[in-house]
């Protein structure tokens, strides 16, 4: 049952369930390195990780500057070992972050393709509906308020894409001129 407030709860629940299945499928399809990258980046991006590093660096510096008398300094100033460890950690963390970002970019690309397909289907359904309404209006000899027959013809996707390409500046070329207006 549809109400004035929009789709029914069952429709919304079905849509949410379909999207959840798609998302779960993508999570399951990740490679081992992508799973590890996700785990590492989720862990590294926490306050606990920042606190751990602050405590670790403070302890390392206190021990290796001689403030802790019971422990002999093993990496005196300028803390070459600490610098090496932190540099290696930064390198590997950067790699894991890039792996995670690449996986997220592939997921975003897939969503964009899915969104485009759904939009194209919706456009085709709207065109078919408008054709039906137009035939009904002709059958009952009704004059349309706006006789725009362009809406009842199939959209030439390649033509629209060309118009978009003309209107948008080339990302590799900086131009002080604004993009040309879209011509129909």
Image (cartoon, helix red, strand yellow):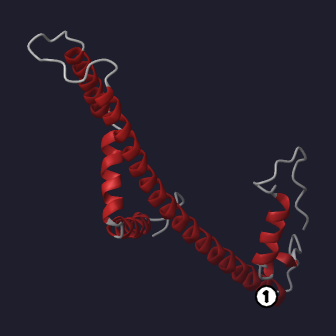
Viewer-proximal residue, 177 or 112?
Answer: 177
Left or right of 87 in this view: 126 = right
Quadrant of the rendering where the N terminus is positioned: bottom left
Q: Residue at x 48, y 63 (%)?
A: 107
Q: Residue at x 42, y 54 (%)?
A: 100
Rendered location of residue 160, percent (x, y): 80, 71
Q: Secondary structure at mark 1?
A: helix
Q: Residue at x 80, y 57 (%)?
A: 170
Say which residue label 1 marks: 135
Rendered location of residue 42, percent (x, y): 33, 45
Rendered location of residue 125, percent (x, y): 65, 79
Q: Quadrant of residue 28?
A: bottom left
Rendered location of residue 96, percent (x, y): 39, 51
Q: Is residue 170 depicted above or below 2 in this figure?
A: above
Viewer-proximal residue, 71 or 16?
Answer: 71
Left or right of 167 in this view: 119 = left
Q: Is residue 29 depicted above or below 46 in this figure?
A: below
Q: Is residue 77 depicted above or below 170 in this figure?
A: above
């Amino acid at each position: 049952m549809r109400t004035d407030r929009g789709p029914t709860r069952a429709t919304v629940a079905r849509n949410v369930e379909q999207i959840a299945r798609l998302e779960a499928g993508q999570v399951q399809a990740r490679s081992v390195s992508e799973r590890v990258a996700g785990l590492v980046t989720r862990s590294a991006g926490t306050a606990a990780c920042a606190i751990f590093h602050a405590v670790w660096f403070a302890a390392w510096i206190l021990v290796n500057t001689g403030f802790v008398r019971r422990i002999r300094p093993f990496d005196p100033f300028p803390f070459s070992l600490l610098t090496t460890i932190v540099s290696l950690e930064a390198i590997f963390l950067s790699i894991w972050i890039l792996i995670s970002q690449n996986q997220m970019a592939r997921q975003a690309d897939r969503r964009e393709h899915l969104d485009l397909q759904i939009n194209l289907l919706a456009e085709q359904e709207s065109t078919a509906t408008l054709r039906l309404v137009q035939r009904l209006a002709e059958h009952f000899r009704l004059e349309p308020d706006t006789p725009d027959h362009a809406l009842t013809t199939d959209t030439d996707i390649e033509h629209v894409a060309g118009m978009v390409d003309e209107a948008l500046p080339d990302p590799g070329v900086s131009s002080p001129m604004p993009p040309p207006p879209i011509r129909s």
